[in-house]
Amino acid sequence: MNTSKNKASSLPSKSDLLAFIGSQRGKVGTREIARAFNLKNNLRAELKTMLRELADEGAIEKRHKKLHHPGALPSTILADVTARDRDGDLIATPDEWDEEKSGPAPKVRIHVPRKARPGEAAGLGDRVILRVEETGEEDGIRYRGRIIKVLDRPKSRVLGIFRKGPNGTGRLEPVDKKMLGKEVAIPMGATGDAEDGDLVAVETQRVARFGLPTGRVVEKLGSLASEKAVSLIAIHAHSIPHVFRNETMAEAQAAKPASLSGREDWRHVPFITIDPADAKDHDDAVHAEHDGNGGFIINVAIADVAHYVRPGSALDREALVRGNSVYFPDRVVPMLPERISNDLCSLRANEDRAALAVRMLIGPDGRKRSHTFHRIMMRSAAKLSYDQAQLAVSGRGDEESEPLVEPILKPLYAAYEALVRARNERSPLDLDLPERKILLKADGTVDRVIVPERLEAHRLIEEFMILSNVAAAETLERARVPLIYRVHDEPGLEKVNALREFLATLDINFAKTGALRPEAFNRVLRLMKGRDAEPLVNEMILRTQAQAEYAAENYGHFGLNLRRYAHFTSPIRRYSDLIVHRGLIRALKLGNDGLAENTEVKDLAEIAAEISATERRAMLAERETKDRLIAHHLADRVGATFDGRISGVTRSGLFVKLAETGADGFIPARTIGDEYFAHDEKAHAMVGRHSGETYRLGDSVTVKLVEAAPVAGALRFELLSEGRAGRPARGPRRPRSGQEPRPSGKHRPKVRHRDRKNKGKRKAR
């Protein structure tokens, strides 16, 4: 195969493409192929079509905008240690693998250096981050991996709430939803002095053939009865570090405020902070002014955390382990001690604070013309909440905000309006998914659940931060300093095809050809605006998207429709941002506390994998805590009826999200209707075998709460609504085990929807 650039350009054959992709050990994408075969712009469109055809045929697959033969592993993976080979070496299996598409998951033989560092020793059952390389096949294994970090050890313990029994005995209510209803008996002498309501860890001793398994309390973790701290469950269930080490606290307490030495004095710039009303730390401040040519100068100042958290220090080591702050309704588990996050690095009004600032010149069209970074001393002129800022520019300012309208707020909003023009032209993914917020009473129980209004003030800060993040990534790339990108891959082919099939049921076409862009999804969202199915389509498009993560190699941000993007604006609560700050300090020679000169991409790849894992851990813990709080809130309303929407359809039943609280609950398939209901995967529906009665994803339903398990955060509903008319389901005549029709079903109450008479019309649409 001759790919010399001196040859006349011509479109290669599919076999040539496959051979070239297979020969490349580094990253390979459309750009690399076009260069190798000297393809000009007029042939690149045809090349993309050919690559899409190869992907449809299963000959290649796309991961992070790079092409691989199916079954290839990336250089850094999350894996489970599952076995040992005959020589005693550990064998790992990748955590995420599509067997239907790529066949059985490949095995990775773990190489342990003779002088292994702490954290590199793993055992069976451990979950690890591996750096992987492909070697010659040996005993059917063609990958070798080195452990970057052990994330999780196998749990020989069960976490749960201790319930006191008679005669010094007890029982454990597990907090894991998967163990719902599977209690553990605690015999006399094994309770470890646990009191009723304590969160405890129990080591199971045996699984009885009959009766409950038994166990021994090995650790008391706190009392939910006194603290009312449901978040305590998630903290321990996910092993989230929540107590700072002594050396970390000592280092934080010894920190002194930064001086003006080596900094530009920007204390005359009237920055302001705009945050939630209950915010305790303020890590970003903004300012804007007209440039005299129809454009704007936008200044964004970010707390200079790098000054206080030096590489290799106790503060730095613990920040990396935590990865990010974790936000619960009743508490925050911070990445850094309060002396740093809420004091020295919080941009308080009328106090001198060290910051890293970016000054951006914006044209009248909202596009960034240029930018510069500065290490400064600043003084915030005011602290406003989002509501305060919005009310003030609407003519309803208070004593604090009214004087800021003309000199500060109006220029900010004018600059934001210009940025909106550029944003609309860029057309990022425009999902409308309202986020609920749980408000607590003084005793820690749920007061109510609200959906905060999305204000222009929120969008203003968001656009300023996005622009700053792009500027940081551009600066580091130009300086050739390695960085951690915030990346978001485009949706996978299978998910896009599934979405296309679903949209076809709504008579909406989703293009099959051409490069996938966020605008393709936005077009669908605009078509659905104001229609009954709008929330459903928003949810389905969200499920189609890949998960954003951190990476040392750039493959862009699909959702924001940006070629390069990094997190720079929240170093108080995200370790990724701290790395970017250090990179800027090194690149621009702003001090001696920047990124080490010997830092390589592979080093940052390891950190990126770690903090991506801690981010996912935090998201899961936050979601589980909300589920538990709402389950506690609804526990005394068993038997009540609620309106909601079907949010998930599986073979085992329906998931329903309540309209009032956003709580999620489950309806087992065997309790639906008076007949066998089959799962129609393509239509995302459960369909009656004989009647054709259909319950579909997104349908409005009325349900009755029949069970609430607060400890596990689980709700079980009974379906009261009738389904929409449809065709009888095809399939086996005999029901599967567990789905026998209920003989007393005809006495089940039915609630007819107000739009029941329009069911036929809905089906036609």
Image (cartoon, rainbow, N blue to C red):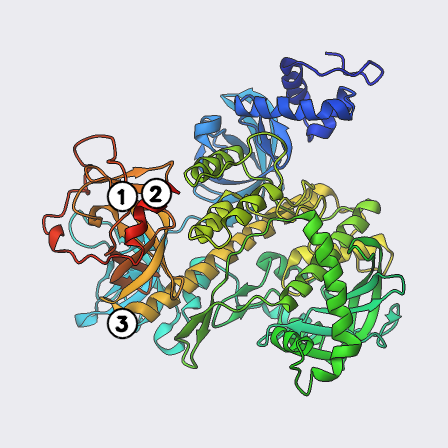
The image quadrant of residue 394 is: bottom right
- Checking the image for residue 725, the label placed there is 1
Separation of residues labelled 2 and 1 (CA atoms):
8 Å
| Residue pointed to by mark 2 | 763
Which tag, 3 or 2, sits closer to the chain's start?
3
Q: Position of residue 99 (x, y in %)?
A: 44, 30
Does 467 sit above or below residue 724? below
Instruction: Name the amino acid type tagged 2.
Output: Lys
Closer to us: mark 1 or mark 3?
Answer: 1
State the residue at coordinates (69%, 26%).
Answer: 45
Instruction: Look at mark 3 in the image and give the residue it sits on.
Output: 636
| Residue 169 spot, x, y in % from top left | 21, 67
- How much space separates mark 3 and mark 2, taking CA atoms? 38 Å
Q: Secondary structure at mark 1?
A: loop
Q: Is residue 554 above or below residue 732?
A: below
- Badge count: 3
Q: Position of residue 702 (x, y in %)?
A: 28, 59
Dots 2, 1 in contact, CB < 8 A:
yes
Quick one: which residue is furthest to the left in this view?
Answer: 743
Q: Earlier in the sequence, mark 2 or mark 1?
A: 1
Q: Residue type at mark 3: give it.
A: Asp
Number of the front mark, 3 or 2: 2
Where residue 291 sits, quadrant-wise, is bottom right
**In the foreground, 360 or 487:** 360
Spatial CA distance of label 1 from label 3 is 35 Å
Which of disc 3 and disc 1 is earlier in sequence? Answer: 3
Callout 3 secondary element: helix
Left or right of residue 498: residue 190: left
Q: Quadrant of the N terminus?
A: top right
